[in-house]
Amino acid sequence: MLFTPIKPMLLHMGNNEEIDDDPNWIYDIKWDGWRILLHKEGDRVEAFTRHGNNVTAKFPELQEVGRSIQSHTAIIDCEGVVLRNGVSVFDDFNYRGRLSNKGKIEQATITHPATFVAFDILTTDKPLLNKPLSERKEVLSSIVEPSNNLLVTPSIVGNGSNIFQLTKDRNMEGVVGKRINSTYKTNYRSQDWLKYKHFKIADVVILGYKENPFTMLVGKQLSNGKYKPLANVEFGFKPEEKTAFREIAKQIVTKEERDMTWLEPRLCCKVQYLEKTNTGSLRIVSFKGFNFDKVPETIS
């Protein structure tokens, strides 16, 4: 298991209306970055993404991380983030993940310093996968000496509604709820782990669409009259909404390409999204219905 790719345990999406204060659940802050598994043995530390890619060379901070882990052997599940005023910024860590030039990587440790926020542990010198979450968290806290590059995520038993509101007030991504007695199952998406995210709603203009899979390109009008694409929307459509849209779209087609049908920017809709990137694009987007009361010029 050590220094080999591991597919981590995954979460289901929870219903924000169902977060409660059940003492059988532990709630963590949800950080917005890359899922990273840290492997340590002695002075050797390596980092793997959830897809099994070894990204150790991208993060010189791992040398300091290794010194913060007070155990000869460990595999720690965490989120790699760049923190700005205590809030994780996805674009910043994604930037770190794209770098391959050694000089730029060294510079980025100053401008975009990486922090690994630990939330679970798979093994030390003994396997922990079958231990309950509460016990694994105790082990994790006991072996991590917090530093600028390695932290243990704050957790709270019950009081899910309070921590969910706190993360909303701080403009954070959301929370993760986990059954206190849940074991760790690699390569498995469990109902014992649920994520609750703070989504936002935006009015947008439909600029085009494609089939297979059905996807809308949405955007907004700029001050110069041109339109800027903001997101490709693939999820959230009801069958009857697709059917109605195709009938309307026939009347406003401007250009057909191999994989995209472009439309006159006359039809508006609402989308749900998690956050905006530095360039204004929308992340984690789903369709929330047509908006026939809106005209493109009124969308900002």
Image (tube, rainbow, N blue to C red):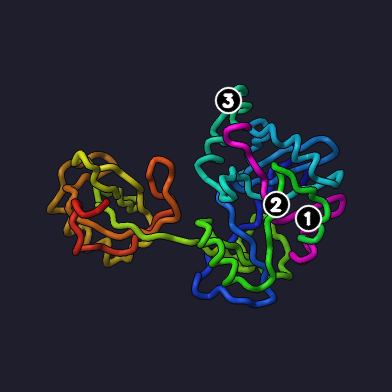
Residue 20's x, y, as percent?
58, 76
Residue at the spot 65% in from the left edge and 43% down from the top edge = 115
Mark closer to the chain start, 1 or 3: 3
Q: Is residue 158 magenta?
A: no
Instruction: Work out whether 211 lies above or below 244.
Output: above
Instruction: Work out whether 20 lies above or below 268.
Output: below
Cβ–Cβ under 8 Å for marks 1 and 3: no
Residue 21's x, y, as percent?
62, 76
Q: Is residue 130 magenta?
A: yes
- Identify the residue under disc 3: 104
Boundaries of the magenta span? 110-136
> Label 2's element?
strand
Residue 210 in view, yes or no = no
Q: Is residue 177 left or right of residue 39?
A: left
Q: Which amino acid does label 3 sit on?
A: Lys
Residue 269's x, y, as percent?
27, 59
Query: Residue 118 has which mark?
Result: 2
Q: Residue furthest front?
A: 85
- Identify the residue under disc 1: 140
Task: Residue 116: name its quadrant.
Answer: top right
Q: Residue furthest left?
A: 251
